Image (cartoon, helix red, strand yellow):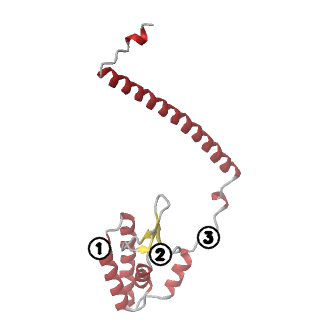
Amino acid sequence: MDKCCMCGRHIEREDAPVLAMGVAGNPRLLCDECAALLDTATLGKNIEDIKVAMERIGNLMADGNPDGVTYSIVSELMVAASDRAKAIKDGSYDFSLDGEEQADEGFEEIPEELLETEEDREKDRRDEEKNKKFDEFYNYTLIGACIALGLFIAWKVLEAFGVDFSQFFNA
């Protein structure tokens, strides 16, 4: 079961909002309440609602002890939300910019030069075979070393209890 990256609550939804993707490809998910708070802080039109949302986000971040990536992303969002709130308060904010930002966030088609080619798939297959052979060799070597170590320990234990092995070697 996944947890919210901001508040730590368990997330029941399979399609939970994603704040960011980690380096290892692990998504940093948001619960519905934290996602709504971020939406209000970054896209809200009422100054008081934005202030309340930003304050609650700050409290959640202080209590939730988020990881560094989550903290830096939310901090950047809060700085942008604060600037936006100031512009709204001054009356200089253009709300049509909100729609443009959301449109820019969408994924475009992957460029042809970044698509995986047949040569890439073949290279991946060869690399996988090479890694499989190396793993097999390493496993057999490790098993052999463990058996040798076990026999050596057994020999030393038996020798410590006075078992005389000379009769086996003087045949």
Residue 38 percent location from the top left of the image: 41, 80
Q: State how far apart marks 2 and 1 are (Cα).
A: 21 Å
Q: State how far apart marks 3 and 2 are (Cα).
A: 30 Å
Amino acid identity at mark 1? Asp
* Vertical position of residue 153 compared to residue 16: above or below: above
Instruction: Name the mark nearer the viewer: 3 or 1.
Output: 1
Tell me if residue 101 can be seen: yes
Is the residue marked by circle 1 packed among few (<14), some (14-19), or many (20+) residues within 10 Å? Answer: few
From the viewer's perspective, is 68 left or right of 101? left
Q: Residue 108 is drawn in which quadrant?
A: bottom right
Q: Which residue is mark 1?
A: 63
Q: Which residue is mark 2?
A: 12
* Vertical position of residue 47 compared to residue 12: above or below: below
Label 1 element class: helix
Residue 129 percent location from the top left of the image: 62, 41
Q: State how far apart marks 3 and 1 are (Cα).
A: 37 Å
Residue 98 percent location from the top left of the image: 49, 84
Residue at the spot 45% in from the left edge and 84% down from the top edge: 43
